Amino acid sequence: EPEVTQTPSHQVTQMGQEVILRCVPISNHLYFYWYRQILGQKVEFLVSFYNNEISEKSEIFDDQFSVERPDGSNFTLKIRSTKLEDSAMYFCASSQTGYGYTFGSGTRLTVV
Amino acid sequence: GDSVTQMEGPVTLSEEAFLTINCTYTATGYPSLFWYVQYPGEGLQLLLKATKADDKGSNKGFEATYRKETTSFHLEKGSVQVSDSAVYFCALSSMNTGFQKLVFGTGTRLLVSP
């Protein structure tokens, strides 16, 4: 069964550093998403991406965050200057039609 | 805004016990409702869904009924197995132009012992 692949599974970074989380969506999918879960809290929508542009972003997704689909296969989330409160599990998801997701297994980001 | 509330965990059961995980929601309009499951080290997997009032979603012995009058979507299973140990997330979709955005609850960890 096709999978959404996220790398790395766990990343530790120092506060203030830039970090890039990588995702390989399912190859024929057109809609891409990032969600995050701070430990013990809700899974929260960050951003959706379609046709090479952001469709919608949450208020969490401020100027420190950006997304890119650089080469037609990868979908990346960049955090420019990480803060302690960015520590969370980040989930990538993709969808062929915009309805019905396939999620990746997540990247646990720890900011120290 | 839309929100989902689910019971705190962990829920600890013995094998073959009956499972209920409560979920209630607040939403404008008529959302679709979902249960997702996350097994250790894996991603979020869709377990079941219901798209309108009184629909029952079911999969792998799990069931949930969309109750509009009580704004609930409780997850049930008649006889749990050790392999059901996982984190269960209730979610709703808030409809937006062109795509579906999910609003999740905090998740409930289920631990099943032999």
Image: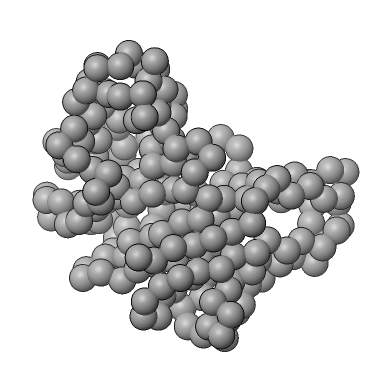
For the question of whether residue A25 can be seen, the reply is no
Q: Report whether A13 appears left or right of B107.
A: left
Q: Percent x, y for residue A68?
A: 16, 39
Q: Percent x, y for residue A51?
A: 13, 55
Q: State how the image is colored.
A: one colour
In the picture, the quarter occupied by the C terminus of chain B is top right
Q: Percent x, y for residue A3?
A: 42, 45
In this view, the residue in front, A23 or B50, is: B50
Note whether B23 is above or below A12 in the view shown: below
Numbered-mark total: 0
Q: Residue at x 60, y 43 (%)?
A: B39
Q: Percent x, y for residue A56?
A: 20, 56
In the picture, the quarter occupied by the N terminus of chain B is bottom left
In this view, the residue in front, B80 or A73, is: B80
For the question of whether residue B102 can be seen, the reply is yes
State the image quarter where residue A13 is shown: top left
In this view, the residue in front, A8 or A58, is: A58
Note whether B100 is above or below A77 in the view shown: below
Looking at the image, the residue that sits furthest to the front is B1
Q: Report whether A107 appears left or right of A41.
A: left
Q: Residue at x 41, y 73 (%)?
A: B27
Note whether B114 is above or below B55 in the view shown: above
Q: Report whether A19 appears left or right of B4.
A: left
State the image quarter where residue B97 is shown: bottom left
State the image quarter where residue B80 is shown: bottom right
